[in-house]
Image (tube, grey):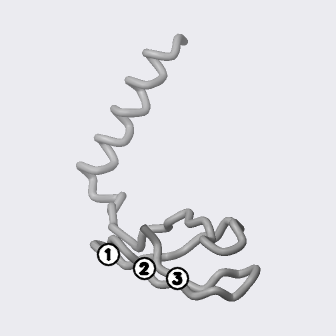
Amino acid sequence: MDKKAMRDEAERLVREAMEKRSIVVKQGDTRIEATCGKCGAPNRVKAAKGVTRADFTCKECGHQQATL
């Protein structure tokens, strides 16, 4: 089975499951990968749906800031 056939099979299975209503697609919170402006440490921030800028505190240095 080549890649295209596998992709088509996966799409067909998902389509069938959605028609049967056995799968429910939900929208949840967004996870933003932010870098601290003070120390440069990577931070993972959860933001509510529709929010573009989320306030967070750096895990390494404790500096409070907002995501871009």
User: Can you say whether 25 is above or below 36 in the image?
Assistant: above
Front-lying residue, 49 or 43: 43
Q: Quadrant of residue 27?
A: bottom left
Tag 1 residue: 51
Q: In this view, does 47 lie above or below 24?
A: below
Residue depth check, mark 2 versus mark 3: number of the one nearer the observer: 3
The span from disc 3 to disc 1 (Cα, nearest Å) is 15 Å
Q: Is residue 34 above or below residue 55?
A: above
Of the image marks 3 and 1, the number of the one nearer the N terminus: 1
Query: Residue 62, which numbered label?
Result: none
Q: Mark 3 points at which residue?
A: 65
Disc 2 vs disc 3: Cβ atoms closer than 8 Å?
Answer: no
56 left or right of 51 in image: right
Residue positioned 57% across, 88% down in the render: 64
Of residues 50 and 9, the one nearer the viewer is 50
Q: Is mark 1 on a helix, strand or loop?
A: loop
Q: Which amino acid does label 2 sit on?
A: Ala
**Dot 2 surroundings within 10 Å: few (below 14), some, or many (20 or more)?**
some
Question: Which residue is denoted by mark 2 in the rendering?
Answer: 54
Q: How crowded is mark 3: few (under 14 residues within 10 Å), some or many (20 or more)?
A: some
Given contact means CB atoms under 8 Å apart, are the residues at marks 1 and 2 in contact? yes
The residue located at (28%, 50%) in the rendering is 18
For mark 3, give the secondary structure: strand
* SS at circle 2: loop
Quadrant where the C terminus is found in the figure: bottom left
Question: Residue 35: image x %, image y %?
Answer: 61, 65
**Where residue 42 sits in the image (x, y, percent)?**
67, 65
Q: Mark 2 or 3 closer to N-term?
A: 2
